[in-house]
Amino acid sequence: MTRVALLSNPRSTGNRAILPRIRSFCAQHSEIFHYEVEDVDQIGAALRTIARVRPQVLVINGGDGTVQTILTQLYHGRSFGETPPPVAVLPNGKTNLIALDLGAVGDPIVALERVLELARNGLTDHIVQRELIALSSGDDSVAPVLGMFLGGAGLADAMLYCRNKVYPLGLSNGLSHVLTLFALFLSLVFGMRAAFLPPKPSAVKVSLIREGQIQGVFSLLIVTTLKKMLMGANVLGGTGNLGALQLMVVDQKPMSLVRAALAMASGKLGKGKVAGMQVERGDEIRIEGERSSVILDGEIFQARKGQAIVLRQTSPLAFLRLAA
């Protein structure tokens, strides 16, 4: 009997060290059906094969980009019909924002053991519903890309800076993120400009449909359907239309960034107004600007000149939360 289907991307950075242990664990547990892809283009075929064994839960072993591709295929490909199994995500990759939101932290083997335990004893109490972000240019003839965490404005620049200039140094993920935050602090708070620092953000216009526009130069722009944003901060709402898309923007002013960081670190995000920061919710968001580049779950997207990046919420998808 197949209780768990595990879909692995061996090319994910985190899998270079952990994959041999995962293969060994799966070989010792016949209830796990392990499928490895050599390229993300094979994910659609992998899901169709996995659907034939009818697993109780689908586990993703890869970085945020792998998770994004699988979620997109699940939603558009309909490999499992109208009721795909709940999705679990192993802690892997560089950022692990989706895994963190679902309570998967630490050793991927421990997380996989937890998934198997839940599959044996009953999943119902651990299933949570999450809407996804559907990203497009507004053209309904083109299938949107799906994800759960989007960064724009100065945050997108910082994420690209970390990927292109910090990760190649070979440092640990934690140290790389600390170094990136320090460089971002020098750039945004002290206004320092240098080739080794993130670039200055460009002006961006953000429109919450039926709720008006937010226009300015932002150090941070986040849209997510996760329950946590940066630094583990819980997202509790905002004053706008109560849609699934949670929007946070922070002005490009030193004190605005400091106040936002303190609000997130102290758990006060969304509980009251913070000068220079807005937290809103909606079911459709448009992002426009001179450089409308965003990063959705690790993948870069850029609108063509004169077009907007359009974000809409999807219907809920079932996920497996590993924490008690």
Image (spheres, rainbow, N blue to C red):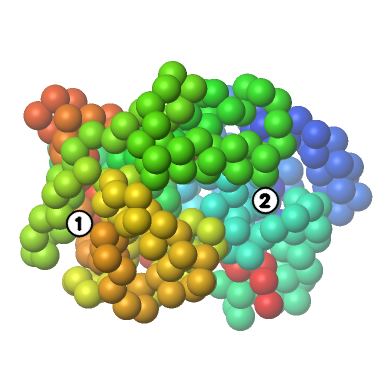
What residue is shown with label 1?
284
Q: Earlier in the sequence, mark 1 or mark 2?
A: 2
Q: Residue at x 73, y 43 (%)?
A: 34
Q: Residue furthest top?
A: 195
Q: Residue at x 60, y 58 (%)?
A: 100
Q: Secondary structure at mark 1?
A: strand
Q: Residue at x 61, y 80 (%)?
A: 125
Visible residue check, residue 71? yes
Q: Are marks 1 and 2 in contact (CB under 8 Å)?
A: no
Q: Secondary structure at mark 2?
A: loop
Image mark count: 2
Foreground residue, 38 or 66?
66
The residue carrying pointer 2 sits among few (fewer than 14), some (14 to 19) or many (20 or more) residues within 10 Å by Cα, namely many
Q: Which mark is residue 91?
A: 2
Residue 102 sits above or below residue 288 on the image = below
Q: Where is residue 205, by image quadrant?
A: top left
Residue type at the position of mark 1: Glu
The picture places residue 77, in percent across and down from the top left corner, at 41, 43
The picture places residue 135, in percent across and down from the top left corner, at 29, 43
Visible residue check, residue 85? no
The picture places residue 82, in percent across and down from the top left corner, at 41, 59
Foreground residue, 93 or 269?
269
Q: Residue at x 32, y 57 (%)?
A: 256
The residue carrying pointer 1 sits among few (fewer than 14), some (14 to 19) or many (20 or more) residues within 10 Å by Cα, namely many
